[in-house]
DNA sequence: CTAGGATCCTGTCAGC
DNA sequence: TGCTGACAGGATCCTA
């Protein structure tokens, strides 16, 4: 799925486009994507004004004037597309950014007011249907189980101490599995896990217990750097999906050093990047830079 | 409690 | 061409 920088990019885009608008209608094309009753939609969503768009980890939170919030997880293939006075899309990059909507990946459709031509729609597209939208009282959002147990936000304040405490709870795990764990540090997914470990020159299969505090701090800093770089490159949006010439781009090219670069050469040492499997996930690694230090037992 | 694998889905791609 | 299996920017559930 979209990871922290991609979701943050969506948040920023939506903040500009939909705050202050009213939701006029909701069309749920796939019920499992948004489990809610017709009466709840009627009572808490229709005619509500969008007050704010927030993010926690990889979760988007759209606060409504009804004191309810739409909590959205894009998971692997979720994306949000706005069509109206202007066209905008962010999240999982695919052709639904640019094609006619709704299409076969559209799961939920919101009709909004306030567009010059009277047509203003927000599409929740999600090919694999892993993503979801939930309607939750705004005050209860932070008490949702998944949200309550999240680790610190990597790009806010000083997450280091909290990260160290939490990552040590997974001393026996491969470090990649540990940093993918959202209760250790929020928002890292497969891309930034690989990028962080490449940056810190740590092999993804290294057990956490074999890594010093100092090296763990380096991994965190490396993740933060990769995320900031991705954010300033503009995240994964319609704009980075199709460039000004109408040609397809790949926003990974703007910041990634190893992710999906297997077969290419390591930007640091020139060795060929290989792809292995760690924690059940495809993992990209430079075996020359990232030596496996298996010490204990 | 932790750790690892299966699972939820659809689509695409490599290899026969 | 058609089939088959592997795999995918995530997290949960189940088992050990």
Image (cartoon, coloured by chain):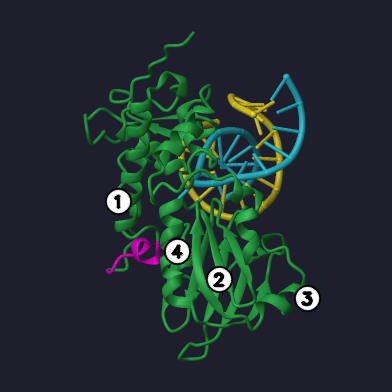
Chain colours: A green, B yellow, C cyan
Q: Is residue A94 above or below residue A178?
A: below
The earlier-in-sequence mark between 3 and 4 is 4
The earlier-in-sequence mark between 2 and 3 is 3
Element type at marker 2? strand
Q: Does any portion of residue A77 appear in the rendered image?
A: yes
**Which-is-in-front pick, marks 4 and 2?**
4
Q: Is A177 one of the magenta-colored residues?
A: no
- Which residue is labeled 4 in the image? A10
> Which residue is pictured at 31% across the width and 45% down the height?
A225
| Cα–Cα span, label 2 and label 1 | 27 Å
> Which residue is pictured at 35% across the width and 45% down the height?
A224
Q: Are marks 4 and 1 on the same chain?
A: yes
Q: Are marks 2 and 1 in contact (CB under 8 Å)?
A: no
Q: Are marks 3 and 4 on the same chain?
A: yes
Q: Chain of mark 2?
A: A
- Which residue is labeled 2 in the image? A123
- Say the numbered circle drawn on residue A229: 1
| Cα–Cα span, label 3 and label 4 | 29 Å
| Cα–Cα span, label 1 and label 3 | 44 Å
Q: Taking A137 as reference, is A81 left or right? A: left
- Which residue is labeled 3 in the image? A39
Q: Are marks 2 and 3 in contact (CB under 8 Å)?
A: no
Q: Chain of mark 1?
A: A
Q: Does any portion of residue A207 appear in the rendered image?
A: no
What is the magenta range? A237-244
The earlier-in-sequence mark between 4 and 2 is 4
Q: Are marks 4 and 1 in contact (CB under 8 Å)?
A: no
Residue A58 position, x and y percent, is 51, 53
| Cα–Cα span, label 4 and label 1 | 16 Å
């Amino acid at each position: 799925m979209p990871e922290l920088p991609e979701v943050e990019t969506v948040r920023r885009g939506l903040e500009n486009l939909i705050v202050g608008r009213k939701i006029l209608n909701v069309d749920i094309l796939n019920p499992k994507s948004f489990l809610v009753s017709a009466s709840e939609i009627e009572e808490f969503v229709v005619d509500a004004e969008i007050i704010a768009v927030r993010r926690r980890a990889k979760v988007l939170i759209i606060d409504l004037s009804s004191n309810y919030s739409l909590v959205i997880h894009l998971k692997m293939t979720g994306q949000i597309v706005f069509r109206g006075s202007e066209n905008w899309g962010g999240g999982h990059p695919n052709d639904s950014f640019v094609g006619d909507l709704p299409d076969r990946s559209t799961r939920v459709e919101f009709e909004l007011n306030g567009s010059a031509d009277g047509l203003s729609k927000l599409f929740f597209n999600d090919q694999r249907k892993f993503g979801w939208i939930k309607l939750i009282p705004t005050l209860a959002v932070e008490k949702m189980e998944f949200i309550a147990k999240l680790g610190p936000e990597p790009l806010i304040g000083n997450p280091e101490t909290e990260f160290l405490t939490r990552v040590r709870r997974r001393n026996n795990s491969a470090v990649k599995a540990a940093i993918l764990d959202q209760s250790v540090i929020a928002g890292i997914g497969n891309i930034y896990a690989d990028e962080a470990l490449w940056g810190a020159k740590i092999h993804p299969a290294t057990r956490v217990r074999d890594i010093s505090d100092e090296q763990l701090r380096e991994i965190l800093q490396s993740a933060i750097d990769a995320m900031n770089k991705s954010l300033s490159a503009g995240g994964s949006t319609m704009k980075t999906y199709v460039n000004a010439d109408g040609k397809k781009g790949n926003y990974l090219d703007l910041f990634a050093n190893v992710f999906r670069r297997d077969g290419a050469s390591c930007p640091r040492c020139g060795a060929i990047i290989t792809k292995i499997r760690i924690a059940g996930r495809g993992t990209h690694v430079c075996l020359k830079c990232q030596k496996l230090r298996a010490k204990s037992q």
